[in-house]
Image (cartoon, rainbow, N blue to C red):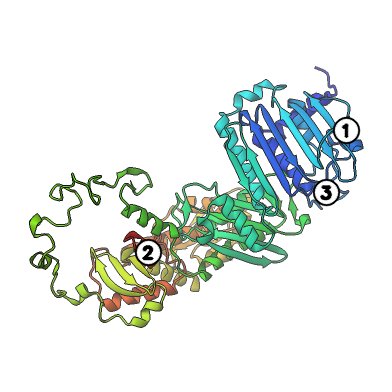
Amino acid sequence: MPIHQLSETMINQIAAGEVIERPASVVKELVENALDAHASRVEIVTAGGGLNLIRVTDDGNGIPEKELALAVARHCTSKLSDDIHDIRSLGFRGEALPSIGSVARLTIRSRTASSGNAAEIGIEGGRVATVRPAAANRGTTVEVRDLFYATPARLKFMKGERAETAATSDVIKRIAIAFPAVRFTLAGADRSTLELAASDNSPEGSLRRIAQVMGADFPQNSIVVDAEREGVRLQGHVSIPSFTRANALQQYAYVNGRPVRDKLIAGAIRGAFADVLPRDRHAVTVLFLTLDPATVDVNVHPAKADVRFRDPGLVRGLIVGAIREALAGAGIRAATTGAAGMMAAFRPGAPVYDRDGSTSGHRSYDPAFRSGSANFDPARSPQRPLDMEIRGGFAESSQASFDAGAPLSADGRAGQSEAPEALLGTQLGAARAQVHKNYIVAQTSDSLVIVDQHAAHERLVYEALKNALHSRPLPSQMLLLPEIVDLPEDDAERLALHSETLARFGLGIERFGPGAVAVRETPAMLGEVDTQQLVRDLADEIADNNTTDMLKERLHYIAATMACHGSVRSGRLLKPDEMNALLRQMEATPGSGTCNHGRPTYIELKLADIERLFGRR
């Protein structure tokens, strides 16, 4: 076939294949246009998951009648100057509207503040109609019907209506977090409505919008992050280690106000939480990066979800360092959801949760056990308190059953008299008892604290080992014969550049001719190690992230294993002074709210919650 010029419709359909992946992609492009037009209210209506109808209405600046035809032409935009590196808007490519119009039936109705009436233009499968007068308020309404009718093959790749609606809702939430002063509403054909009321751009207003999107629990279980390095500013909130999710869907990242899904940022978040979360749990984060537009490329992909930083090492280091510093500065905190789960477990009829979070039934409840029931028989009730003679009830002779006598030992008393009352004002309070030879029960001025002694001491030992690892170069073991590892020249050069850092961790390497390195020493902590695989994994890590964190994580894993086996074991009786000493160490150690495996080390139940359990409030 000879070379020929593609038709304008075909060009737009090819562009649509990159820009318009699914209905949520259309909503994203149209909402971004509304925000670039300084809208304070954006309303979205969908039908059929967005395949039948998408309507986006805003109260922004509007499009002048004479510019409507240009708005639906390719590579026409009002958002980009002559400098491609100075992008300060969400949209800039001038592809979205013509791409949508090439695969759907598109109508744009708009009116500016200075215009007496509105105007309308339509596109159907790439064919543009003439501009005509219309009636509308100030702002713009974009209506998209029969999405992908012109490219029916794409419809085969769409998911169900509920899945497409959920994807659209997620897009709105991600955008809304960055624009708290804008009111967003999303309505579907199933009468489901998402409404995010407008707030303001203050830190408090931003946190209110975050709570609207991520739930009321997040602000109470989050830490503020605010750091700056070499002109790059990082702000936002991250969850405390005991407040996690099973996936990374609630990790929101923004670059100059643009929602992104960036591999470097996701990897930096994982690295920052590596020591405090298990591998199958994920932190909840909202992070805003602000930097000079010239130092970040947002034109990597037509969907604009990927970005590329001029100095990725700087950005990654800032994120990891700022989050770790925030976690350390926040001290020890327990997730409020732990107390909520305990409260729910005490209530009759509450679901019983297994360790993986699934339910395995409900608390038993005798419907006859209520005041005034004529059918209630205490002898058969599962809630009967004691197997005693019913007629005796709670007479003086029966009360003797509750007399436990004097404590058998100091361990039994667990510091009831010895614990100084001054400790009640500390965060974890004064130890009052040890139950089941594993759990320390402590009292503060306004709460009850239950501590898992093994998990808590495991974290303390691990942090001490880490400090020892980083305070001086690690011991290494000399290889009898150097191990030669053949690598691509680029990988060998990268390893050589990081040789000083690797030496601090006990790995001694040097160049050995072109495309090879010689390994002369390995970290003593690792014991017998596959040197070839270790070096290749390090080369891959450096190529991807320009760091040697993989070796550090492997050493930390060894330290965590040593901490697990060297900490206070479950089943060991502790003296009152030992329990109080453990509580004081936890208060002084960052990250001690979770163990090395990510489980909580303690749960706090406020006095007000306890009083509600007993009907006092």
Q: Which residue is mark 1?
A: 69
The amino acid at mark 1 is Ala
The amino acid at mark 2 is Leu
Which mark's residue is nearer the viewer, 2 or 1? 2
In the depicted view, which residue is nearer to us: 591 or 179?
179
Count residues near mark 1 (Cα–Cα under 10 Å), then give few for <14, some for 14-19, many for 20+: some
Taking 167 as reference, is 477 left or right? left
Taking 130 as reference, is 384 left or right? left
363 in relation to 393, above or below: above
- Say what secondary structure mark 2 lies in: strand
Query: Which image quarter: residue 397?
Result: bottom left
Residue 462, given in percent of the width and then of the height, sits at 40, 66
Asked if the residue under mark 1 is in contact with the one under mark 2, i.e. CB atoms within 8 Å, the reply is no
Q: Which residue is mark 3?
A: 84
In the depicted view, which residue is nearer to us: 216 or 469?
216
The amino acid at mark 3 is Ile
Taking 333 as reference, is 93 left or right? right
Query: Which image quarter: residue 118?
Result: top right
- Say what secondary structure mark 1 lies in: helix
Residue 612, given in percent of the width and then of the height, sits at 36, 61
Which mark's residue is nearer the viewer, 3 or 2? 2
Asked if the residue under mark 3 is in contact with the one under mark 1, i.e. CB atoms within 8 Å, the reply is no
Q: Residue at x 12, y 49 (%)?
A: 379
Q: CA distance from mark 1 to mark 3?
A: 24 Å
Q: CA distance from mark 3 to mark 2?
A: 55 Å
In the depicted view, which residue is nearer to us: 398 or 72?
398
- Say what secondary structure mark 3 lies in: loop
In the image, which disc is placed on residue 262?
none
In the image, which disc is placed on residue 605?
2
Q: Residue at x 23, y 46 (%)?
A: 366
What is the residue that sits farthest to the right in this orientation? 66
Chain-order first, disc 2 or disc 1:
1
